[in-house]
Amino acid sequence: MEYEDMNLKTVSCSDKLCGIVISSGNRSNVDSFLDLITSKPIVKEKLKGGSLKIVEDNGEYYGVLFGAIGNMPIQHK
């Protein structure tokens, strides 16, 4: 699947968390991309919880995904 007007802003991982930020002028593209990436079997297998969010700023939509990796799930306090 190809997404027009998509920009990869950052990808970063530590030994416990991974995160990705993408952007587009089209909210639907951001939403579809986040749905696609989180539906991948390898992502479902490796992530132990996390969060997705779409934020709008001046007509640009930012998709944020972060997830726990490793053996322990994220615990909210």
Image: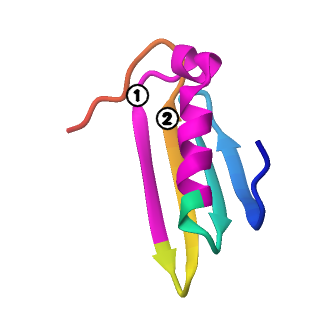
The magenta-colored residue range is: 29-55
Q: Position of residue 53 (x, y in %)?
A: 43, 55
Q: Secondary structure at mark 2?
A: strand
The crowd level at tag 2 (other Cα within 10 Å; few <14, some 14-19, many 20+) is many
Which disc, if any, is residue 67?
A: 2
Residue found at x 56% / y 45%: 34
Is 41 or 49 nearer to us in this picture? 41
The crowd level at tag 1 (other Cα within 10 Å; few <14, some 14-19, many 20+) is some
Under mark 1, the amino acid is Gly
Decide whether residue 21 is among the magenta residues: no
Image height check: is 74 above or below 11? above
**Residue 17 seen in the current view:** no
Residue found at x 54% / y 13%: 45
Residue 15 image-quadrant placement? top right
* Callouts 1 and 2 close, C-beta under 8 Å: yes
Residue indicated by mark 1: 49
